[in-house]
Amino acid sequence: CKFADSLGRHRLILVSLCLALTGSFQLFLRVAVIPSHALRLVWAVLITILYTFFWCGVLPLTDYLILKMLSSRSGFSRDLYGRQRLWGTIGYGVITLIISKAISKLGITSLFYILPISTTICVLVLLLLA
């Protein structure tokens, strides 16, 4: 977040992180074809570390953008932010349930299609809110 603060381009950094998350997750497809189990494990751990590195900045930047949007509205209060967080949590739970049902029906490999689609939706929403 300090990097985004210094640049003042929070939305651009968040979009970049979302795209980097998807790209790093797609690297797992390459791990499946590695013949050595030990080497496959090493690469899976490295990709997980890379994915986690990008994920660490997403939530604080999302919170920042939500606070910025809400504080620009008249009547901003802590309760308004709390309601936003509550509905975000409920939405997260509903989406997790839907995606788990989709993975159960379509198989785990469907995740490699679901993630890019959801990232595209996220990026479009971020760009439209500009």
Image (cartoon, rainbow, N blue to C red):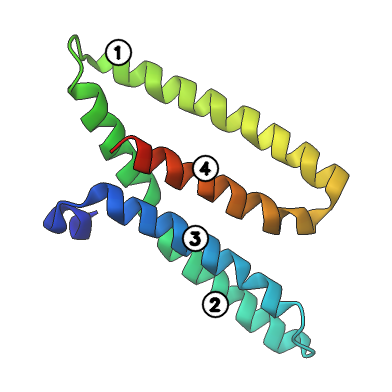
Tell me where residue 91 appears, x and y as whole percent: 55, 27
The answer for how far apart the CA atoms under marks 4 and 3 are is 14 Å
Front in this rendered view, residue 10 or 81: 10
Front in this rendered view, residue 13 or 82: 13
| Badge 1 amino acid | Asp
> Counting residues from the N terminus, which is met first, the one under dot 3 or under dot 2?
3
| Badge 2 amino acid | Leu
Would you place residue 127 above or below residue 7 in this image?
above
Instruction: Identify the residue at horizontal 75%, vertical 77% (top origin).
Output: 32
For residue 79, which numbered disc appears in the image? 1
> Which is in the foreground here, disc 2 or disc 4?
4
To which residue does mark 2 refer? 46
> Counting residues from the N terminus, which is met first, the one under dot 2 or under dot 4?
2
The answer for how far apart the CA atoms under marks 1 and 2 are is 41 Å
Would you place residue 56 above or below residue 68 in this image?
below
Describe the element under mark 2 as helix, strand or loop.
helix
Describe the element under mark 4 as helix, strand or loop.
helix
Front in this rendered view, residue 5 or 126: 126
> Counting residues from the N terminus, which is met first, the one under dot 4 or under dot 3?
3
To which residue does mark 4 refer? 121
The answer for how far apart the CA atoms under marks 2 and 4 are is 27 Å
- Position of 26 with respect to 15 (left or right) is right
The answer for how far apart the CA atoms under marks 4 and 1 are is 28 Å
> Counting residues from the N terminus, which is met first, the one under dot 1 or under dot 2?
2
Instruction: Identify the residue at horizontal 61%, vertical 30% (top origin).
Output: 93
To which residue does mark 3 refer? 21
Q: Where does the C terminus fall, quadrant-wise?
A: top left
| Badge 4 amino acid | Ile
